[in-house]
Image (tube, rainbow, N blue to C red):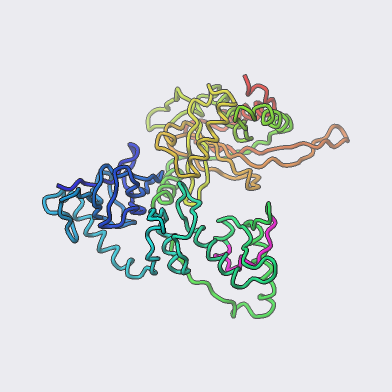
């Protein structure tokens, strides 16, 4: 009997998932412990290993939403007959209706998809780890994916790697002089934006470290090429870009539903308060130098998390959940920190933030942020949050209205540190200030207690030595 391959359940709240990518093609061999497929869920993506050695038979194609525990394929051990299609005779048919519908739904898309490179292994016989988008783009741009080095998690080849190779090849063909054949380095975001704005990235001058092309460089180049074009021809003659349809699924679908539900079910208000950050800036610079050998590098967000954790202990109504007939004051203080990814927002949780020393808190928040960006965050890292901090200061934001992460009753937006002026009589004094934006659920607490909580966070940041206690 073949062994069923299930859609793995990740976390108690998982309701559906998608086989984002089959690492082992249909009908190919897999070894026990090898990567079998990549799972996309509402919160996290992860790789699933094979539990035994044998021949893989797909039942569900890539990109079809299924329920946890549904059968997505089978593994046939040596000596077992592998059928040509459909569910195996005598095997479990728990997912047969879903699989048949999935195959039918995927058939038109498959026939319309651009060709992908035929190469599935490298010259040394090693298997290539690459995303479906990367393989699709490689087919469009005629790039041999087997020659690329991946920059994604675990050396996985991603779309940006394919585009970079295509850009380098194009620059090599069109270039002249000493720099011919050498493409300027550029970030994946810059290359993606260049494609969206129809900018030839090979002609963009990079201003980043080592001449690296940044998002700002691409935007500047787009502005330069748009101005002459607008003068040379009337707007009606401007080239039109085709509409693109982006499916709302996975993490994006979950974020959309939860943010809409949060606004529909809560009485959310936002207030701002300025913090004088001169002392915090000095302390942070001293701690970065003092803790370098310990592997701790505190950020300004870490200082805010610690201040929030201390303030929550003093203002328990902000560390709560609101029910139909009661307000539950939560015993633990676990602060979630919003991390922006290409596919959406993810909120890993610094557990027991009130009891962690600042150095340990900095190490833990750095671990969580790296895990989130590398696709290695676990379901446990995302659960148990009692309050959320959402930092946007690194993007130059002065004020915004964060939306509460239900069922919590508050979220704190962290803005940029800016130069400002205070007055000592008639004498101006330069200061560094940061604005905090607190959104709270008015059903759980009124404006005055919310303001007192925010003032406590402010006072702690303005006297930051208290954060070390």
Left/right of residue 28 with respect to residue 164 in the rendered view: left
**The one of 242 and 211 positioned closer to us in this rendering:** 211
Quadrant containing the C terminus in the rendered view: top right
Question: Looking at the image, which residue is at 48% across and 44% down?
Answer: 374
Q: Residue furthest front?
A: 124
Q: How many marks?
A: 0
Residue extent of the magenta highlight? 194-207
Q: What percent of the width, then of the height, locates residue 226?
A: 65, 71
Q: What percent of the width, then of the height, locates residue 132?
A: 40, 58
Question: Looking at the image, which residue is at 39% across and 66% down?
Answer: 116
Q: What percent of the width, then of the height, locates residue 33?
A: 32, 42
Above or below residue 367? Residue 254 is below
**The one of 173 and 354 positioned closer to us in this rendering:** 173
**The one of 87 and 451 positioned closer to us in this rendering:** 87
Asked which quadrant contains residue 221, the reply is: bottom right
Left/right of residue 93 with respect to residue 218 in the rendered view: left
Q: What percent of the width, then of the height, locates residue 235?
A: 62, 77
Asked which quadrant contains residue 125, the reply is: bottom left
**The one of 430 and 360 positioned closer to us in this rendering:** 360
Question: Looking at the image, which residue is at 46% across and 24% down?
Answer: 332
204 part of magenta stretch: yes
Q: Residue furthest right?
A: 426
378 part of magenta stretch: no
Above or below residue 326? Residue 150 is below
């Amino acid at each position: 009997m073949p062994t069923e391959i299930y859609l793995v359940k990740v976390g108690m709240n998982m309701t559906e998932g998608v086989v984002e990518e089959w690492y082992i093609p249909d009908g190919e061999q897999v070894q026990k412990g090898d990567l079998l497929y990549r799972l996309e869920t509402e919160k996290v993506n992860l790789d699933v290993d094979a539990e035994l050695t044998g021949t893989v038979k797909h039942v569900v194609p890539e990109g079809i939403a299924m329920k946890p525990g549904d059968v997505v394929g089978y593994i046939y051990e040596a000596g077992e007959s592998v059928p040509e299609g459909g569910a195996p005779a005598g095997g479990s048919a728990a997912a047969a209706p879903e699989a048949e519908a999935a195959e039918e739904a995927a058939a038109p898309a498959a026939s319309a998809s651009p060709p992908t490179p035929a190469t599935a292994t490298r010259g040394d016989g090693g298997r290539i780890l690459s995303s479906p988008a990367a393989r699709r783009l490689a087919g469009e741009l005629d790039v041999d994916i087997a020659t690329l080095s991946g920059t994604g998690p675990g050396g996985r080849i991603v779309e940006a790697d394919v585009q970079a190779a295509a850009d380098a090849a194009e620059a090599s063909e069109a270039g002249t002089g000493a720099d011919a054949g050498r493409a300027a380095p550029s970030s994946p975001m810059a290359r993606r934006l260049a494609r969206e704005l129809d900018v030839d990235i090979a002609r963009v001058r990079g201003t980043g470290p080592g001449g690296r092309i940044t998002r700002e460089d691409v935007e500047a180049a787009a502005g330069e090429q748009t101005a002459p074009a607008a003068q040379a021809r009337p707007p009606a003659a401007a080239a039109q870009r085709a509409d693109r349809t982006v499916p709302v699924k996975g993490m994006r679908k979950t974020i959309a539903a939860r943010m809409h539900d949060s606004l529909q079910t809560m009485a959310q208000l936002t207030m701002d308060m300025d913090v004088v950050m001169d002392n915090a800036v000095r302390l942070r610079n001293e701690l970065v130098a003092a803790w370098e050998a310990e592997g701790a590098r505190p950020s300004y967000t870490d200082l805010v998390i610690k201040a929030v954790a201390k303030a929550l202990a003093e203002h328990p109504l902000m560390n709560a959940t609101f029910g139909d007939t009661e307000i539950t004051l939560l015993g633990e203080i676990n602060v979630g920190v919003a991390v922006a990814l290409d596919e959406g927002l993810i909120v890993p949780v610094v557990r027991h933030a009130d009891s962690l020393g600042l150095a340990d808190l900095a190490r833990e928040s750095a671990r969580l942020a790296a895990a989130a960006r590398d696709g290695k965050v676990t379901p446990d890292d995302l659960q148990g949050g009692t309050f959320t901090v959402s930092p946007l200061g690194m993007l130059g934001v002065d004020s915004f209205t964060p939306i509460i992460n239900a069922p919590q009753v508050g979220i704190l937006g962290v803005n940029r540190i800016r130069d400002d002026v205070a007055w000592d009589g008639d004498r101006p004094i330069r200061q560094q200030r940061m604005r905090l934006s607190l959104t709270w659920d008015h059903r759980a607490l009124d404006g005055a207690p919310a303001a007192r909580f925010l003032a406590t966070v402010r006072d702690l940041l303005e006297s930051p030595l208290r954060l070390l206690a």
